[in-house]
Image (cartoon, rainbow, N blue to C red):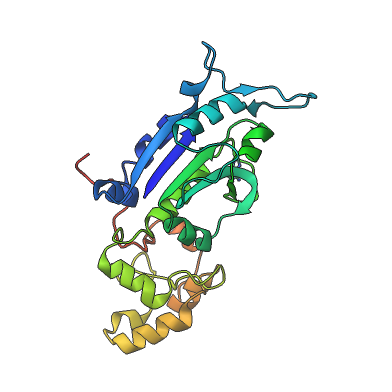
Amino acid sequence: MQIDILTIFPSFFDQFLRHGMVRVARRSGRLDVRISDLRAFAEDRHRTVDDRPYGGGPGMLLKPEPVFRAMDLLGLDPGKQPAAGTVPLLMCPQGQKMGQKDLEDFSGAERLVILCGRYEGYDERIVEAYPWKRVSLGDYVLSGGEVAAMALIEGTVRLLPGVLGDEESALRDSFGEWTGPEGLDHAHWTRPPQYRGRGVPEVLLSGDHGAIEKWRRENSGQQGPGHRDAVTGNSGNPASDGGSPDRNQDGVSQEEIPGE
Ligand code: ADE
């Protein structure tokens, strides 16, 4: 998959692209990320990419020229459909709220072209000229689309074939890792079996795989507040123990992968 990102803050992505699954995917050749710095496409010597809205009002808008010129160079023509397999994505709070199904769709594309806004919004000619899918991270306003684009990329890349190890992929398939907002994964524990007075459900320590599977199925989607305490018999605020293991469905350390 190729991902083109259009942004006025290319360096936002420096660390992001060098860590975790995104890095793994890039190193294995499954993912090629290219960043277009919109300022490089500005026409004046101040590299201006924003301007005041006609008719007045607060805030600034992303100007059309840098975006059109960057899109020209990427081979996307205004008013035309992009090549088959290319999906242009416009990050904005007015877009459709991104869900797991969207990420699955994106992971099937050959190429994503992601425009990250800044300021109050886009000159409407940018919006009209390309067949964008408008994508929102959620019902709140960020200062720009970069963080939303990173969420989109991270969620998409781990769905690319071969990016997660066999074990994790199989896990995803057999359990249906994402079953909707009410059907989240069951809770998890790792060693030690006792920590600061907090235990682990006995069944998970039993070695009885049938019983463990049954327990997990019965306890999927029940990670609401207090649930963990109910199953472990613990009391108190789980957030305050400072020792609960981070959940990591990938089964991969979230530490930086050494060697870069
Ligand atoms: N830009 C500003 N807010 C945003 C949001 N909620 N989602 C995507 N892009 C944005």
* Above/below status of 187 relative to 92: below
* Above/below status of 137 relative to 61: below
| Number of dots carrying numbers | 0
- Residue 8 visible from this viewpoint: no
Q: Which of 127 and 75 is in front in this view?
A: 75
**Residue 191 falls in which quadrant of the image?**
bottom left
Side of 243 where 45 appears, left or right? right
The image shows residue 168 at horizontal and vertical percentages of 31, 67
Q: Who's the residue at 40% across and 86% down the image?
A: 214
The image shows residue 252 at horizontal and vertical percentages of 29, 58
Placement of the C terminus among the 4 image quadrants: top left
Q: Who's the residue at 40% across and 76% down the image?
A: 175
Residue furthest to the top: 45
Q: Nearer the viewer, residue 51 or 1?
A: 1
* Above/below status of 191 relative to 108: below
Q: Nearer the viewer, residue 43 or 16?
A: 43
- Residue 232 visible from this viewpoint: yes
The image shows residue 151 at horizontal and vertical percentages of 47, 49
Residue furthest to the front: 80
Please tell me in which quarter of the rendered image ligand 1 is found. Answer: top right
The image shows residue 235 at horizontal and vertical percentages of 49, 70
* Above/below status of 113 relative to 241: above
Residue furthest to the left: 259
Q: Who's the residue at 38% across and 54% down the image?
A: 157
Residue furthest to the right: 55
